[in-house]
Amino acid sequence: MNFPEPEALAVDGQIPQEVWAIETEQQLSEALKMALKRPLALIPLGNGTKRHIGYPPEGYDVALWLRPLQGIVEHSPEDLTVTVRQGANFEGGFHDDP
């Protein structure tokens, strides 16, 4: 997966100073704690399909790039259940490896 440039994650013409790629729930927790301490304006982004919705942000210091966090957490075909993270793509069925 390619790491995006800040310009690619612009929201309403605003470009973040930094991009933080989040791969685990623990990293997300630490990122939010760090942003509160500094303080920083964060915008969470997955595939970025809803960036045009809502009011323009008042600030945009860091793009929290959550795309690496998406996917299947657990798939139990015998139980007919699946647990997924945000942004999971179901095209082509369920696969245990990304």
Image (cartoon, rainbow, N blue to C red):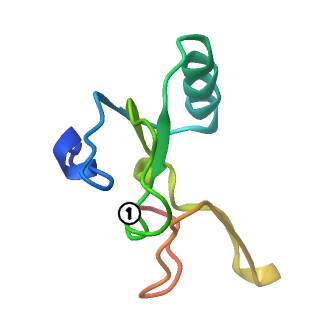
Q: Quadrant of the C terminus?
A: bottom left
Which residue does the image show at 23% across and 42% down from the upper left? 3
What is the x, y in percent for residue 95?
Answer: 49, 73
Asked whether residue 1 is in view, the answer is no
> Looking at the image, which is closer to me, 94 or 64?
64
Residue at the disc numbered 1: 47
What is the x, y in percent for residue 66?
Answer: 46, 48
Which residue does the image show at 25% across and 40% down from the upper left? 15
Which residue does the image show at 38% across and 63% down from the upper left? 47
> Looking at the image, which is closer to me, 37 or 27?
37
Asked whether residue 65 is in view, the answer is yes
Figure disc tally: 1
Residue lying farthest right? 79
Where 76 falls versus 28 (above or below)? below
What is the x, y in percent for residue 63?
Answer: 39, 39
> Looking at the image, which is closer to me, 90 or 13?
13
SS class of the residue under badge 1?
Answer: loop
Residue lying farthest top? 37
Which residue does the image show at 38% across and 29% down from the upper left? 61
Where 81 falls versus 19 (above or below)? below
Residue lying farthest bottom? 92
Task: Using a 10 Å C-alpha cutoff, classify the residue at mark 1 as few (fewer than 14 neighbours), some (14 to 19) or many (20 or more).
Answer: few
Where 82 falls versus 21 (above or below)? below
Where 23 falls versus 55 (above or below)? above
What is the x, y in percent for residue 5?
Answer: 18, 41
The residue type indicated by label 1 comes to Asn
